Amino acid sequence: MTGDLESFTDIDDQYRFQVKLGDGKKLKVEGTCIVVVCTEEGNKTLIRDVLYVPELTLNLLSVGQLMLKNYKLLFDNG
C-alpha cells in the first residue's frame, strides 16, 4: 500500500474500499496501481496490484502477498 501517487506507472480507480491497519484505523483505498521498484544494483521491477491509499504517509509492503505472486525476496543483514 502506498499514498505516493508519483511512484505509480498506472492506476485503476475502480477499486474503492477500506483497509484496516494494525492500530485499528480504517483508511480508504482509491484504486490499485503498478509501482516501479529500483534495486541497489539499478535494476527495475514492477509490483502489480498495489493499493493506493492517499492517507498513508509511509509505504507498507506485504512479504506474504509478494510471495503469493511469485516474487523472490532476499533479506540481508549487511
Image: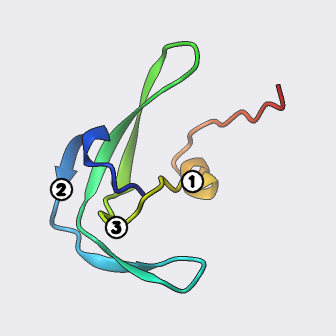
Q: Is residue 14 above or below residue 20?
A: above
**Residue that carries the numbered disc 1 in the rendered image:** 68
Residues at badges 1 and 2 in contact (C-beta under 8 Å)? Answer: no
Q: Is residue 70 left or right of residue 32?
A: right
Q: Is residue 19 left or right of residue 61?
A: left
**Residue that carries the numbered disc 3 in the rendered image:** 55
Residue at image location 39% in from the left, 55% down from the top: 2
Residue at image location 54% in from the left, 86% down from the top: 24
Q: Secondary structure at mark 3?
A: loop
Nearer the observer: mark 3 or 2; the answer is: 3
Which of marks 2 and 1 precedes in the sequence?
2
Nearer the observer: mark 1 or 3; the answer is: 3
Relative depth, front residue between 18 and 49: 18
Residue at image location 66% in from the left, 37% down from the top: 73
Nearer the observer: mark 1 or 2; the answer is: 2
Q: Quadrant of residue 44?
A: top left
Q: CA distance from mark 1 to mark 3?
A: 26 Å
Q: Is residue 43 above or below residue 31?
A: above
Q: CA distance from mark 3 to mark 2?
A: 17 Å
Name the residue type under label 1: Leu
Q: Is residue 69 left or right of residue 50?
A: right
Neighbours of disc 3 within 10 Å: few (<14), some (14-19), many (20+): few
Which of marks 2 and 3 precedes in the sequence?
2
Q: Is residue 11 left or right of residue 73?
A: left
**Residue that carries the numbered disc 2 in the rendered image:** 12
Neighbours of disc 2 within 10 Å: few (<14), some (14-19), many (20+): some
Whole-percent x and y of residue 18? 35, 80
Residues at badges 1 and 3 in contact (C-beta under 8 Å)? Answer: no
Residue at image location 33% in from the left, 64% down from the top: 53
Q: Secondary structure at mark 1?
A: helix
Name the residue type under label 2: Asp
Which of marks 3 and 1 precedes in the sequence?
3
